[in-house]
Amino acid sequence: MTERRVRPALSPMKHAWRKQSPPPAGPPSGPPASGGPAASPDGVPRDGASVVHAALYRDGRRVSTPDSLAETFRQLREYPSGMAWIGLHRPSEGEIHSLAAEFDLHPLAVEDALEAHQRPKLERYGETLFVVLRAARYLDAAEEVDFGELHVFVGQDFVITVRHGAAPDLSAVRRRMEAAPELLALGPEAVLYAILDAVVDGYAPVVEGVQNDIDEIETEVFRGDPEVSRRIYELSREMVEFQRATRPLVGMLHGLMAGFAKYRTDEELQRYLRDVADHVTHTSERVDGFRQALADILTVNATLVTQQQNAEMRALAEAGFEQNEEIKKISAWAAILFAPTLVGTIYGMNFEEMPELHWGLGYPFAVALMGAVCLSLYLIFKRRNWL
């Protein structure tokens, strides 16, 4: 393995730098570049290769665009004061091990980069920083948050990004840095800052999208939408994932700032990093607020659903009570009408020997008996409020 060289100490910035819009389409400043892997605008290789983009920089300006990792290694050895910036998208195991052999990457960091699904963290292996970030983007059509994972290796003269997922768009970060050569001249630490800033800035649209979702959910809750519970649950799960992506960044950035101060990184760069830390803290607080708001909305929704169920049960009970009252009335009148029918049926039997059959007062007696029975039953049912 070729011996790595030590990059000269960073020179202070000559001018204050602020975020700029991407430069117009055209060749980058500095010597013309040729070759390079074909990549789509979102930074994903078109031809199935893992290398999204590789470039060499000197004094903040691009001097070469190698078309392979081997060519990148060779040219980097030819530029003692240069810096390599290599972007990979879901690389193969062979590519990662090739980078590890060339740049002396720690096996544990290499293993994490291959497996992905890591929590955000910042680790130092010798003179190499290994940073894991969780980027996010809001998908308007699906109204959901899509998370990506980014691993960054930062050495004295190289930056390697290993991306798992669509976010973030590092091609925009590269254009932004090439448009500010005075910042890019500060070396790998400046590139790391730009990547962190891009990831954190990508959280802002997600926060706005989630806020709109919460506003819509509140309307649906009080409108009684039956599907709102599922939406609350899904958004709550996304906020748990969002919180896992943002909360560790606060401690990571403070640790990185302490390291920048320890290794005497440019003061202006430290100021920019503090600004990123402030944005992360604000985003983390918003996410915590979202989780609490969703928990409160879920409680309110459960209360409203319970109230609605109670109202429906009360309505059913009232309907059952009214139905029972009607049944009681029908039963009472049926009993009253059944009594004369019973008497008439008995005296309508065709038997020769029956009491009072030939009695002269038999008919009036039978009618009077039916009337008495009906009246008695009416009074009994009336007293019991069945009629």
Image (cartoon, rainbow, N blue to C red):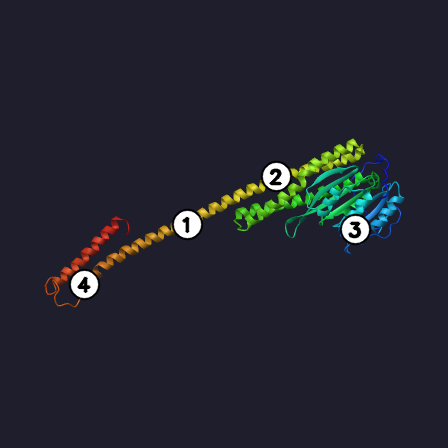
Question: In the image, which disc is placed on residue 82?
Answer: none
Q: CA distance from mark 3 to mark 2?
A: 39 Å
State which quadrant residue 241 falls in: top right
Residue that badge 3 annotates: 51
Give x and y (percent) for residue 223.
53, 48
Judging from the image, what secondary structure is the residue with disc 2 in?
Answer: helix
Q: CA distance from mark 2 to mark 1?
A: 39 Å
The circle drawn on residue 346 is 4
Q: Which residue is mark 1?
A: 315
Nearer the N terminus, badge 1 or badge 4? Answer: 1
Q: In the image shown, does 239 or 108 lie closer to the viewer?
A: 108
Task: Look at the image and tell me whether residue 171 can be seen.
Answer: no
Of the two numbered discs 4 and 2 on the same chain, state the one appearing first in sequence: 2
**Residue 350 appears left or right of 127:** left
Quadrant of res 200: top right
Q: Amino acid at mark 2?
A: Gly
Q: Image check: 237 left or right of 363?
A: right
Q: Amino acid at mark 1?
A: Ala
